[in-house]
Amino acid sequence: MPPPRKIALFGGTFDPVHLGHIHLATLAQEALALDEVRFLPCRISPHKSGTAPAGADDRLKMLELATAAIPWAFVDDFEITQQGPSFSYLTAEAMQKRFSEARLYWIMGGDQWAALPTWKHPEKLSQCVEFVILSRGDAVQVQKYFRHHCVTGEHPASATAIRSAIANGATAHPWLDPRVSAWIAKNHLYRH
């Protein structure tokens, strides 16, 4: 019997997806020999209330453009199609049903790892996945009952800085895939 497929779930607003997201997903994929990384843009982030991201169709399209040449990357619209805030435990439970034979992972940054106990039902999330913590080299605190793997690496990209630069007239950005830059320009995203 072959070993189970290893599938990582990478959630976020991806507003816009940038080279930092791709770099960190690549680090996780290489470190754990992942068969897939599924990029799951959220409909409404429970952690970013009060901010309105670019439309779901635009964020999905930018992810498709940014990952088109990466054989292990998949864009998944599960959270976009759900109602209400995108709670990670609900996504993980749904993915566990969809990929019942797979070993599931959840990619997150060190800041999210530290905040995990405050998330909605982290114990349900932890029953479905092993966590992949992207650390900037800082010591990662062990959290009881949460299985985790540490991957060290960082990238300077910031979606906030990208949106600000575009709002101030930039037509491209070095932290964006050129195809994503072209989509943003064509659709006048992030302009005031």
Image: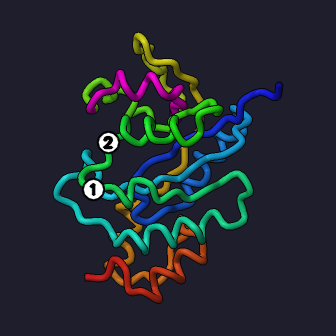
Q: Which residue is mark 1?
A: 83
The N terminus lies in quadrant:
top right
**Residue at 48 percent of width and 20 percent of height:** 139
Task: Name the image quarter holding residue 111.
Answer: top left
Q: Nearer the viewer, residue 127 or 181?
A: 127
**Residue at 40 percent of width and 29 percent of height:** 125
Q: Nearer the viewer, residue 191 or 170?
A: 191
Disc 1 packing (10 Å; few <14; some 14–19; many ≥20): few
* Coordinates of residue 141 in the picture (x, y in percent): 43, 17
Residue 127, magenta (yes or no): yes
* Coordinates of residue 143 in the picture (x, y in percent): 40, 15
Whether residue 186 sits left or right of residue 70 in the image: it is left
Q: Which mark is residue 87?
A: 2
The C terminus lies in quadrant:
bottom left
Q: Amino acid at mark 2?
A: Phe
* Coordinates of residue 162 in the picture (x, y in percent): 41, 67
Q: Residue furthest right?
A: 1
**Residue at 47 percent of width and 53 percent of height:** 40
User: Spatial distance from mark 2 to mark 1, Cα to Cα?
Assistant: 11 Å
Depicted 61 relative to depicted 27: above or below: below
Depicted 145 relative to depicted 15: above or below: above
Residue 18, magenta (yes or no): no
Mark 2 and mark 1 in contact? Answer it, CB < 8 Å: no
Depicted 91 relative to depicted 187: above or below: above
Q: Secondary structure at mark 2?
A: loop
- In magenta, the rendered stretch is 120-135
Disc 2 packing (10 Å; few <14; some 14–19; many ≥20): many
Q: Nearer the viewer, residue 155 or 24?
A: 24
